[in-house]
């Protein structure tokens, strides 16, 4: 059984803050500053360019990828780190479309993260030749799969509502229809058990700055199923995905397996922060994390519904049908969230009226749930949110 007091002690949470926004940006592990400082001073500072070999910077994207692989049920050697998630969505999607010639439709849902849909739009524009993106309501995805579907591209857990797709079932149905799958695990990796290999996923991608706590701008990961690894075209054919980058051949030849999904120079400092953050998984079990997260979200929903009758639950009521976040809606959602933040409870807001609360048992306990409910109840009962400064929109919500 995971000792959540021990995992919590690994994080720095500022005094007086209840942090319910790890679904957007995870907090810092206490060891991150020293780990990054070591990379800066002892490696960059002392080794200079020899650090690429001596400090193992060049192998870091696959080495760290293998640690992520264990968290998402991927086979060793099938995950690599680098770039941002939007870039990795592009690569996975382009490779999947290319592996399924003759079919022209990328199917997704209306709840998908806008960047994924924008990237798909950009890709079909570049491809031309009748390629299109089709979006349907989340619960209509299965029925929308047909003989035109080249790729089913979904985010497993909806960023706004927390609604969770059944990855295994939809992957099976997509394959039955002759389509390939691209799964975005941004709100799954580190939040709940994921089994990409067991589900038969073709491609998966995700970020590390949310539930994996790599810090702002931390790199993304990409998984390619072993059956596609030697056939997938990486789309962004950068030099570090080349078979022999340091031969400097004028022609591109894809590297072996997952290595081809690398593009350019890896973000060494961010990967150092991520390596420190991943140490928490040496003492945390994702199955325990999931069951504790369900206890926390259930208690939060019960508390808010009992004390804040004007807030409406926007997440599935069945805990098995949602991820590790809970959303409520209210026409004044933005101002309410600003009032909460001003009172030390940090969640976030997603337009047009969603208040999001992420529950990460690694550093959130029942006392945080109680405090969040009590603070929200007071804000609602006394209309404390009704102030002009809480209505003024900041650039990042
Ligand atoms: C589901 C999902 N996909 C894609 C992205 C975009 O990620 P990035 O900004 O790293 O490209 C996000 C960002 O929050 C996300 O939540």
Image (cartoon, rainbow, N blue to C red):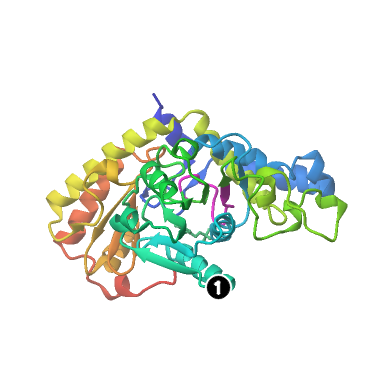
Residue 376 appears at what percent x and percent y?
A: 22, 55
Expressed as whole percent of the image width and height from the top left, the position of residue 26 reads 46, 49
Question: Are there few (<14), some (14-19), or many (20+) residues within 10 Å of tag 1?
Answer: few
Q: Residue furthest top?
A: 1
Residue at 46 percent across and 44 percent down: it is 189
User: In what quadrant of the picture does the N terminus appear?
Assistant: top left
**Does any atom of ligand 1 lie closer than 8 Å to the CB of label 1?**
no
Residue that mark 1 sits on: 129
Q: Nearer the viewer, residue 179 or 45?
A: 179
Asked if one can make out residue 346 in the rendered structure from this viewpoint, the answer is: no
Could you tell me how many numbered marks the image carries? Answer: 1
Query: In this view of the protein, which residue sits in the foreground, 291 or 121?
Result: 121
Q: Main secondary structure of the magenta part?
A: loop
223 relative to 243 in the view: left or right = left
Image coordinates of residue 45 in percent, x first then y, are 79, 48
Task: Indicate the quadrant where residue 63 lies.
Answer: top right
- Is 232 placed left or right of 211 in the picture? right
Image vertical order of residue 91 relative to residue 170, above or below = below
Q: Where is residue 285 in the image (x, y as percent from the top left)?
A: 44, 30
Q: Is mark 1 on a helix, strand or loop?
A: loop
Q: Residue at x 74, y 44 (%)?
A: 57
Magenta stretch: give its range.
210-222
């Amino acid at each position: 059984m995971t000792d959540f007091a021990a995992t919590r002690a690994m994080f720095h949470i500022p005094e007086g803050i209840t942090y319910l926004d790890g679904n957007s940006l995870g907090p810092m592990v206490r060891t991150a500053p020293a780990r990054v400082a070591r990379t800066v001073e002892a490696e960059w500072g002392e080794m200079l360019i020899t650090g690429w070999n001596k400090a193992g910077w060049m192998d870091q994207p696959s080495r760290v990828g293998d640690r992520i692989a264990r968290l998402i049920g991927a086979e060793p050697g099938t995950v690599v780190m680098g770039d941002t998630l939007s870039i990795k969505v592009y690569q996975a999607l382009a490779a999947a479309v290319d592996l399924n010639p003759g079919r022209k439709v990328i199917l997704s849902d209306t709840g998908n993260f806008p960047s994924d849909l924008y990237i798909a739009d950009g890709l079909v524009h570049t491809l031309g030749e009748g390629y299109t993106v089709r979006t349907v309501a989340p619960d209509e995805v299965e029925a929308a799969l047909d003989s035109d579907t080249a790729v089913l591209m979904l985010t497993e857990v909806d960023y706004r509502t927390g609604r969770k797709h059944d990855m295994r079932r939809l992957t099976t149905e997509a394959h039955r229809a002759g389509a390939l799958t691209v799964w975005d695990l941004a709100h799954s990796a580190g939040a709940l058990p994921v089994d990409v290999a067991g589900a038969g996923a073709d491609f998966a991608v995700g970020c590390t700055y949310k539930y994996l706590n790599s810090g702002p701008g931390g790199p993304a990961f990409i998984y390619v199923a072993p059956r596609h690894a030697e056939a997938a075209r990486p789309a962004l054919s950068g030099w570090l995905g080349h078979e022999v980058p340091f031969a400097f051949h004028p022609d591109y030849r894809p590297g072996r397996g997952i290595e081809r999904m690398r593009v350019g120079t890896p973000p060494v400092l961010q990967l150092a922060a991520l390596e420190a953050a991943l140490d928490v998984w040496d003492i945390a079990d994702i199955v325990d994390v999931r069951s504790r997260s369900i206890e926390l979200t259930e208690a939060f929903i019960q508390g808010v519904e009992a004390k804040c009758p004007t807030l409406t639950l926007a997440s599935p009521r069945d805990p098995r049908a949602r991820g590790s976040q809970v959303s409520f809606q209210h026409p004044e959602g933005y101002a309410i969230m600003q009032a909460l933040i001003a009172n030390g409870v940090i969640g976030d807001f997603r337009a047009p009226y969603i208040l999001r609360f992420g529950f990460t048992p690694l550093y959130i306990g029942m006392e945080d749930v109680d405090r969040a409910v009590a603070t929200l109840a007071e804000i609602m009962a006394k209309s404390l949110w009704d102030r002009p400064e809480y209505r003024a929109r900041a650039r990042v919500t």
